[in-house]
Image (tube, rainbow, N blue to C red):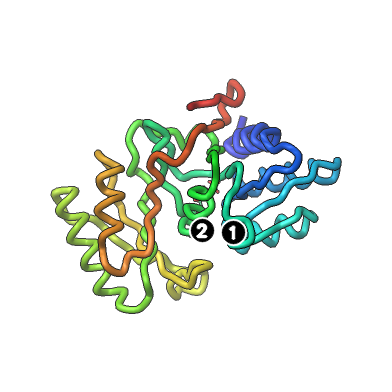
């Protein structure tokens, strides 16, 4: 089974969690796109639900499939959000934001009664941090924010941490749906995700970070032996 087959199996199982009349948050990324495709098929078969997308890309995909969409302001309370992750660590702590949608993903997940993560087996890790941690920042004064984040991370890691401004396709800074920029922090290992999450939130100029702690209730992980559920 390839990674893509594992993602598809997890996404299709998660699509079965959606019941008539539910309000559902739709994640972002390649695994979430497979979920949206599966939900589009269920919509064609007659399932009716209301969706809030975590990115413009997911919104466009769901809209093209005919799925009924609302904004988070129109529907501030959701039943369920299903989203991918870049890493799934102990206690279902997550690193997210590889696709740049972490801020809307966190807002939508926080508005949901349940968050279920879907992923292929490569995303399961013993310790978070191998995947660079995305940190969304204000473009205004970005260099001052980068320096603040760098000194915080150096203090946390006990060594300088490589912190790069994410580039878009044209080489200019990648711009999020919220018109912010992203720093990717190569931490290697995040010993205490909850503590780091709290520290990063207090840095001036940081809008949000990709650590999702105590948010996911379950993970559906595609493996060569089928989809495993972790709670
Ligand atoms: C986007 C995300 C994605 O969920 C994460 O990057 C996983 O993506 P993929 O399913 O393509 O591996 O957080 O901001």
Mark 2 CB within 8 Å of ligand 1: no
The answer to which of 208 and 157 lies nearer the viewer is: 208
Q: Can you see residue 189?
A: no
Which label sits on residue 57?
Answer: none
Q: Secondary structure at mark 1?
A: loop
Query: For the point 42% across and 34% down, which residue is it?
Result: 92
Which one is in front in this view, the residue at disc 1 or the one at disc 2?
1
Earlier in the chain: of badge 1 and badge 2, it is 1
Where 121 falls versus 76 (above or below)?
A: above
What percent of the width, then of the height, locates residue 100? Answer: 48, 59
Which quadrant of the figure has residue 9? top right
Q: Residue furthest right?
A: 45
Q: Can you see residue 155?
A: yes
Q: Residue furthest bottom?
A: 140
Near mark 2 (Cα within 10 A), the count class, few <14, some 14-19 or many ≥20, is: many
The answer to the question of whether label 1 and label 2 lie on touching residues, with beta carbons closer than 8 A, is yes
What percent of the width, then of the height, locates residue 230? Answer: 49, 26
Q: Residue furthest top?
A: 225
Residue at numbered disc 2? 104
Query: For the point 62% across and 49% down, which residue is it?
Result: 26
What percent of the width, then of the height, locates residue 38? Answer: 73, 42
Q: Secondary structure at mark 2?
A: helix
Query: For the point 41% across and 42% down, which residue is it?
Result: 94
Residue at numbered disc 1? 72
* Screen quadrant of the N terminus: top right
What percent of the width, then of the height, locates residue 148? Answer: 21, 66
Query: For the point 34% across and 40% down, which residue is it?
Result: 128
């Amino acid at each position: 089974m390839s990674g893509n087959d594992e993602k598809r199996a997890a996404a299709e199982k998660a699509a079965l969690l959606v019941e008539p009349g539910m309000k559902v948050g739709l994640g972002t990324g390649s695994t979430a796109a497979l979920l949206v495709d599966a939900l589009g098929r269920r919509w064609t078969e007659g399932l009716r639900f209301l969706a809030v997308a975590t990115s413009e890309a997911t919104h466009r995909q769901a809209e093209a499939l005919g799925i009924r969409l609302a904004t988070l302001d129109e529907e501030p309370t959701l039943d369920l959000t299903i989203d991918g992750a870049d890493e799934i660590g102990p206690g279902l702590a997550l690193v997210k934001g590889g696709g740049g949608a972490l801020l809307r993903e966190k807002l939508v997940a926080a508005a949901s009664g349940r968050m279920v993560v879907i992923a292929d087996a490569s995303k399961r890790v013993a310790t978070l941090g191998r995947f660079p941690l995305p940190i969304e920042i204000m473009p205004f004064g970005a260099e001052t924010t980068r320096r603040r984040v760098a000194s915080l991370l150096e203090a946390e890691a006990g060594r300088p941490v490589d912190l790069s401004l994410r580039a878009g396709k044209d080489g200019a800074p990648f711009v999020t749906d919220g018109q912010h920029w992203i720093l990717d922090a190569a931490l290697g290992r995040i010993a205490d995700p909850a503590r780091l999450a709290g520290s990063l939130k207090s840095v001036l100029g940081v809008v949000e970070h990709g650590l999702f702690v105590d948010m996911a209730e379950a993970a559906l992980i595609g493996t060569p032996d089928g989809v495993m559920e972790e709670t």
